[in-house]
């Protein structure tokens, strides 16, 4: 048998990570059946969940708190968003790289949300502030295509973009104007 507990654990880690612990719309009966088979083959689900989701640093938790304080939603369209200012990164000792965790937490803790984004300020080494966003949407929307003109980095479902506006409010309007018409 080629599938030992270590391989099963690694494969299940990928599934749990990609589906945010089976809480995204990408979960299918087939992915659940595969996960069940991996657990039956010895995958250590509790260790995976602990290592993926229960090991937050204090600065990351502080950033999460800032994101929650600014949390907004459009329940009818299942959109959830937040904002992070450059001062939030400075005061919490974090960087924009930790926003992936914030997005993950928003997805996990707001199961009705299908479209999640965080707009943030980032200051470059020359002191210029840029408005950026990390965005994830429901699988039927290819977010990388929606924001193609902003040279998104990421994949079809999860991107980071630099928005050619001068305020966070303008960035939120731009994102909403593009996502709202696509929401089912």
Image (cartoon, grey):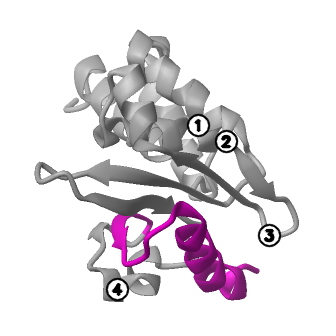
Q: Tell me how far mark 1 sits from mark 4, CA to CA.
A: 26 Å
Please say if the residues under marks 3 and 4 sit with CB atoms less than 8 Å apart.
Answer: no
Q: Is residue 27 visible?
A: yes
Write the start and end of the magenta stretch as one range.
157-184
Mark 3 or 2: the one toward you: 2
Spatial separation of the CA atoms under disc 2 and disc 1? 5 Å
The percent position of residue 61, horizontal first and vertical second, equals 50, 19
4 vs 2, front mark: 2
Disc 1 is placed on an element classified as helix
Give the camera-side residue of 40 and 55. 55
Tell me, for residue 77, which label it has, or none. 3
**Kind of element beneath mark 2:** loop
Q: CA distance from mark 4 to mark 2?
A: 27 Å
Image quarter in which the N terminus is found: top left
Comes first in the chain, label 3 or label 2 = 2
Q: Residue at x 30, y 18 (%)?
A: 5
Location of the C terminus (image quadrant)? bottom right
Q: Residue extending furthest right?
A: 76
In the image, residue 132 above or below residue 71:
below
| Of callouts 3 and 4, the N-terminal one | 3
Counting from the top left corner in percent of width and height, residue 94 is at 33, 27
Label whose residue precedes the other's in the sequence (4 or 2): 2
Instruction: Say which mark, if any, is on residue 67.
Output: 1
Tell me if residue 167 is in the magenta stretch.
yes
């Amino acid at each position: 048998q080629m599938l030992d507990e270590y391989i099963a654990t690694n494969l299940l880690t990928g599934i749990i990570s990609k589906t945010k612990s089976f809480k995204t719309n990408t979960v299918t009966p087939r992915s659940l059946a595969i996960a069940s088979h991996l657990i039956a083959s010895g995958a250590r689900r509790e260790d995976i969940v602990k290592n993926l989701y229960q090991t937050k640093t204090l600065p990351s938790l502080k950033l999460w708190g800032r994101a929650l304080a600014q949390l907004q939603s459009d329940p009818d369209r299942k959109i959830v968003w937040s904002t992070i200012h450059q001062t939030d990164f400075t005061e919490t000792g974090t960087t924009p790289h930790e926003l992936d965790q914030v997005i993950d937490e928003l997805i996990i803790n707001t199961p009705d949300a299908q479209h999640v984004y965080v707009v943030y300020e980032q200051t470059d080494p020359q002191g210029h502030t840029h408005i950026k966003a990390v965005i994830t949407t429901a699988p039927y929307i290819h977010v990388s295509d929606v924001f193609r003109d902003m040279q998104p980095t990421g994949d079809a479902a999860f991107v980071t973009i630099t928005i050619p506006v001068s305020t966070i409010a303008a960035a939120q309007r731009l994102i909403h104007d593009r996502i709202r018409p696509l929401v089912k």
